Amino acid sequence: MSEQPVKSYRVQGFDCVTCANTFEKNVKRLEGVADAKVNFAAAKIAVTGNTTIEALEKAGAFEHLKVRDESEPAVEQIPFWKQKENIKVYLSAVLLLISLIIGIRYGERSLVPTIGFIAAIVIGGYALFIAGFKNLIHLDFDMETLMTIAILGAAALGKFEEGATVVILFAISEALESYSGDKARESIRSLMKIAPKETLVRRDGREFTVPVEDVRIGDIMIVKPGLKLAMDGVVTKGTSTLNQSAITGESVPVTKTIDDPVFAGTLNEEGLLEVRVTKKVEDTTLSKIIHLVEESQAEKAPAQTFVDRFAKVYTPAVIIFAVLLVIVPPLAAGASWGYWIYLGLALLVVGCPCALVISTPVAIVTAIGNAAKNGVIIKGGIHLEEAGSLKVIAFDKTGTLTRGVPEVTDVVAFKDNEKDMITLAAALEKGSQHPLGSAIVRRAEEERLKFNDIAIENFQSITGKGVSAKVKQTVYYIGSPNLFEEILTNGIEKTVHHQVIGLQMQGKTVMVLGTDKSVLAVIAVADQLRDSARNVIQKLRQSGIEQTVMLTGDNKRTAGTIGKEAGVSDIKAELLPEEKLAYIKSYRGKQKVAMVGDGVNDAPALAEATVGIAMGGAGTDTALETADIALMSDDLTKLPYTIKLSRKALAVIKQNVTFSLTIKALSILLIFPGLLTLWIAILADVGATIVVTLNSLRLTKVKE
């Protein structure tokens, strides 16, 4: 049996999570559809099987949903107060207001205001009633069903003005939910608009403008000053500064020249660039960011899972309570049916979990969207919550706390001069792949030393210790001090040993150059601490991180110096990769721990941590794939912002859930003294929706 096709569509008009779930159920019932999955946060639906846009819009007719193919250009968002379906709400509100004024003058039970109230109910609520009755047929007691029963019940009891008020306030609540969802999705829409839809390319000797979908890998993209790049690629000609803030969150422009990678959506500020395209439009870094953010916003956080489970129990429980409230007192005590039916209807309104249902997703979507705009990809609500409750953060040393580019800092020559020693060392190391050897070769190149003129014979790599090679019949060695302790008959002399220890105490890695007879020079190489490292550690401590740990394979003296300079609270040195993993496991057994690294060498430790955080996500797919959180720039200062945002998001979620539950509990308690009315019930629901929405949108204001 052939696999069913999966196609994604954009959906416009989602008011709430419940409406999205109803739409998903309706789509699953369509002929030819095997499965459907709605992503409320991204306003998308993925359909497995075959259907049409017309059929999908029919399935969403209860909410006037508009559907378009994912590849089609976005439709300009109409403000919710201008949307056609909301005009009826304005008309109902006007009728209600006029009827109330007339009722004050002539009495609310007189004919004219009564007709006005009924008209307000019908005009503002007919779409709600249709959806409510359809759901009632399927015994689906959602918000529309409960409101339909409450409004029509109020009208049947002659409470027309209260029925009309419930219609209007419920419509306002729906509009607010829609507005909050649209505001939260703004970050995704802004990302989608970043890259141009067409670009100038050179192909087969001709230059022409083509849509990005038609650009091929290998095409030469010509980018003029002031224009944005449409595709990822590598610079083949020209030098310019690029603003990469759309990808990395860094506002400082970066200089790009031949062989440098560049990304779609970045702005070319100065020179003319020619770029060889390396990825298709759907595979660009920007496309991956958009995809990851959309998928992560759909991932439910633990708080949201709790709310969904609670709502499934809460609403049926309130309905049962309302039925008992209506039946038991009149039957058991001969109480007034009208009074208890009215209380039961008010309780049904309390049973609508609107504010509770949106309390978590709006906060999560807003926070993840804000993070994406600032160059941080948080891959799901669960990681957002976990980051908000971290107590320990472990750092890989090389390339995380340090710059990741070793530099020669000291050359102590015991024979000849420093330049001769560097020339010989570079000649020996040019065949090595070790980062420390590369640092020596770079130093020789910078000083324009002629190390390539030295003939090398019998090159050998001594695993974990260094290298050796023959130059003019003499075998030379370069490597760790331990190597020379082995090859020298009497070991390293005391004066050389003191030099080595002194340099190691400064946080430098020491390499020794010599023969099997004597030491010729000591070369110190240091991977310099990032300028921002100490400040970042201080900010993390201020934000509530109790312990910062540095994990490294480097020697204890060097690690100790770097760790103290950075200000970390604990240092673990001379670790193998499996030992780093073991440390993360031991920390995780006690409390929540994050691991920060490059996502490549430390991938196992990142995976084991409560939250794995990879740096430099824009430059490597591995970081984006392996980490729970990816810092798109190679910039440690994004970490305190990430923790700050996560902590605020966690606090907002707790505030929203607590406030929503408290309002519901207080409303239910008002039943016992007989104080609960339809007015209070609907105002409590709308008020709670407004509060949790505005509280969640505060997360858009969190800055670095």
Image (tube, rainbow, N blue to C red):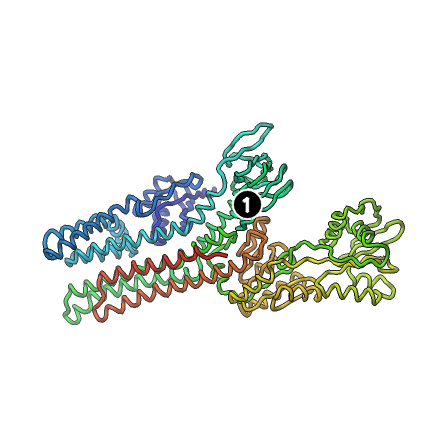
User: Residue pushed farthest front?
Assistant: 270
Q: Is residue 365 above or below residue 651?
A: above
The residue shown at (84%, 66%) is 493
- The crowd level at tag 1 (other Cα within 10 Å; few <14, some 14-19, many 20+) is many
Q: Is residue 557 left or right of residue 418?
A: left
Q: Amino acid at mark 1?
A: Asn
In the rendered image, residue 283, in percent from the top left (x then y), is placed at 54, 43
In the rendered image, residue 592, in percent from the top left (x then y), is placed at 53, 66
Q: Is residue 1 left or right of residue 138?
A: right
In front here: 669 or 641?
641
Q: In the picture, residue 604 is in which quadrant?
A: bottom right
Element class at badge 1: strand
In front here: 314 or 178?
178
In the rendered image, residue 633, in percent from the top left (x then y), is placed at 57, 52
In the rendered image, residue 171, in percent from the top left (x then y), is placed at 27, 52
The residue shown at (77%, 59%) is 511
Q: Is residue 604 visible?
A: yes
Q: Is residue 283 visible?
A: no
Q: Is residue 422 above or below residue 200?
A: below
Q: Is residue 401 left or right of residue 112?
A: right
The residue shown at (60%, 28%) is 205
Q: In the picture, residue 466 is in which quadrant?
A: bottom right
Q: In the picture, residue 342 is in which quadrant?
A: bottom left
Residue annotated with mark 1: 243
The residue shown at (31%, 53%) is 174
